[in-house]
Amino acid sequence: MKYQHWNLRRPGAPAARRALEEAGFSPLCAAALAARGLDRPDKAARFLSSGPERFHDPFLLKDMDRAAARIRRAVDGGELICVYGDYDVDGITATCLLTEALAGLGGQTVSYIPDRSEEGYGLNSGAISRLAGQGVRLIVTVDCGITAAAEVEFARSLGVDVVITDHHHCKDRLPAAEAVVDPRRADCSYPFPELAGVGVALKTAQALSPPEERERVFLRFGELAAIGTVADVMRLTGENRSMVRQGLELLGRTERPGLRALLREAGLEPGAAPTAVTIGYGLAPRINAAGRMEQAMVALELLLTRDGERGEALAHTLCRLNRERQAIELEIYDRCVELLEARPQLAAPAVVLAGEGWHQGVVGIVASRLAEKYSCPAFMICLEHGQGKGSCRSFGGFNLFAALEQCAPLLEGYGGHEMAAGFTIREENIPAFREKICRLVSLRTGGEPMEAAVDVDAEIDQCALLSAPQVESLSLLEPFGAGNPKPVFLLRGAAIVSCCDVGGGRHLKMRLRRDGMMLDAIFFSANAAACGVSPGERLDLIFTPQINEFRGNRTVQLQICDLRPAPTRAQLEQELFQRLREGEELSRWEAGLLCPSRQDFARLWRFLERSAVGGWMEAGPSLLRQAARQPDGRWAYGRTLVCLHVMGDRGLIRLERDQLHLCRPENKVDLEQAAMMRRLRLFLEEE
């Protein structure tokens, strides 16, 4: 199993799902929406809306008026402006966006992205000195700068003003810049604080234009905003959802030759519409590779160029850099896993590793993979001449930025988000840092090891719901990403008809059967041996449904997230009965397995009367096995347990120690009035 816990969301009430279906949502969509709390048509419509009404006035951002005024003065006065960005996808797209926007206003601009290994993240005094020497009088940061108080003071000493636009967490002291635009500022009341750096850059470009021109600004730069927002794993709700959904449409018809070439390299079929997955797994790794391999300006040029041949060449270069990145990343990852397997104490409660010669550009990805593999936060530190540059990735909701704040006395600098962050540290402070981080993680978990968990939206009661039209209807919920993940469904008791390894033995492909239907399934990065599966076995599995196109045929395929052996019918029913007793909600299908009929009650009562001696009998597993056996030879453990519980609730039987006593009330007993029966009937309410 990949996940220790499958957290099945509470299903929406049948009436709520019915109302969503009557409003035009498919049953599959309605189940997912209701499970996520969007259980009324108006709530669902608000969440899914992505029109221009979701965009907020850029001047609601604190200091945007000051930023726009200073930038406008620089444009009008012919000052040389530097757009200073970060080397990740968010920073590169933001740099491209604001550079083009300022040039379109007549500004004299240069772009600057620091070298990852030589300069590190954000503003640095060496770059500021060089830019000042080139005649730059205003630096506008994008996706960086919020913690650069000392660097801003240095720039001012050289006669260079700084306007900061960023989206990372702020420290107590803000830089003394001309303006500090960051939706995460404590004193900023912007309605949507989850903007990416490129989102803040877009807002800045819109603030420099008259209100009636803001939509045109978005149409010009929307695909860049979508790419940066998805790549930076920002929440795809509210304004971000609108930005990405509309930006994806613009990306599908982009006029940027470099982007068109990169889409082809990423495998997007001609005429196919790009999705958030296209960005996350196709474009983002290739653009990121440039920054990771110290060639971020290659990616920036790819976005800026209007030359088709140059765009093709740059796209090829990014793909080559990405392959190089993958090879280096794999080498470091394998070495770390080898170390952690030999010394497992280093993998709990957090992974904190340091090494000489590690490539700074890839350790963040390695940290992500280690966090997933060992189910804990991971910190990777590249050492050189006694100094360490670290990248870290979260697990289980552990807040990295807050943790680094508490470790500040041990650090030279830090910044980032709750889920991903960076820091610098002296080598001699690493042992104390490791001890402090492990203590913070232990406090967060109560000393218990973290376990991987996945949220499951709904259980599939009938496989007829997995038709192609139903699965296609889920596209209404796109774009998928942080805050709006792909719907995940649970299917119990699917029988394996056939299975084989594909992709050089890296992936598992299966044919499954349930409810008389055949289903195709694929489990990436897992094979039959690792999963321990073979034909004839029954599985419980969680999956996201998708449409697979092959030679013009469109079929449903289950993309498996995790699987486990299905319990026997007896085990399943006893587990469901326990959940029912403890007050948990059941799906309609689960309730159907437990809900007894009048005939079930009558049959059990006759059995008890035959088995009792003087009104008493021994209670125990043997009695349950005998009582659960049906006339047709099948077993009904769940219904039998419910019958016994209900009879006890209504005074027909009494359990004393290990003995069960038959009672004979004078008045007729209405078994349907038992609390457990009322709950089961509620779960079974017709949809």
Image: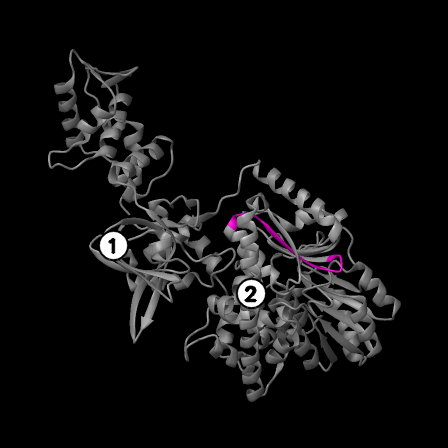
> What amino acid is labelled 1 in the image?
Pro
Residue furthest toward the front?
342
The reply, left or right, for residue 357 in relation to residue 553 is: right
Tell me residue 42's x, y (percent).
44, 54
Residue situated in front as seen by the camera: 192 or 140: 140
Instruction: Tell me if mark 1 has few (under 14), some (14-19) or many (20+) residues whose alpha carbon lies within 10 angstroms of its own.
Output: some
Q: CA distance from mark 2 to mark 1?
A: 39 Å
- Tag 1, which secondary structure? loop
- The range drawn in magenta is 374-387
Q: Residue at x 19, y 34 (%)?
A: 597
Report which quarter residue 599 is drawn in: top left
Task: Please state the total of marks drawn on the protein image.
Answer: 2
Tell me residue 5's x, y (percent).
43, 44
Tell me residue 427's x, y (percent).
74, 53
Relative height, residue 257 to residue 154 (above, below) = below
Q: Does the magenta-highlighted stretch encompass residue 570?
A: no
Residue situated in front as seen by the camera: 391 or 99: 391
| Cβ–Cβ under 8 Å for marks 2 and 1 | no
Relative height, residue 2 to residue 252 (above, below) = above
> What amino acid is labelled 2 in the image?
Ala
> Can the viewer see residue 491 in this picture?
no
Report which quarter residue 139 is drawn in: bottom right
Residue situated in front as seen by the camera: 50 or 431: 431
Report which quarter residue 157 is drawn in: bottom right
* Mark number, residue 27: none
Tell me residue 7's x, y (percent).
43, 45
* Mark number, residue 231: 2
- Tag 2, which secondary structure? helix
* Mark number, residue 535: 1
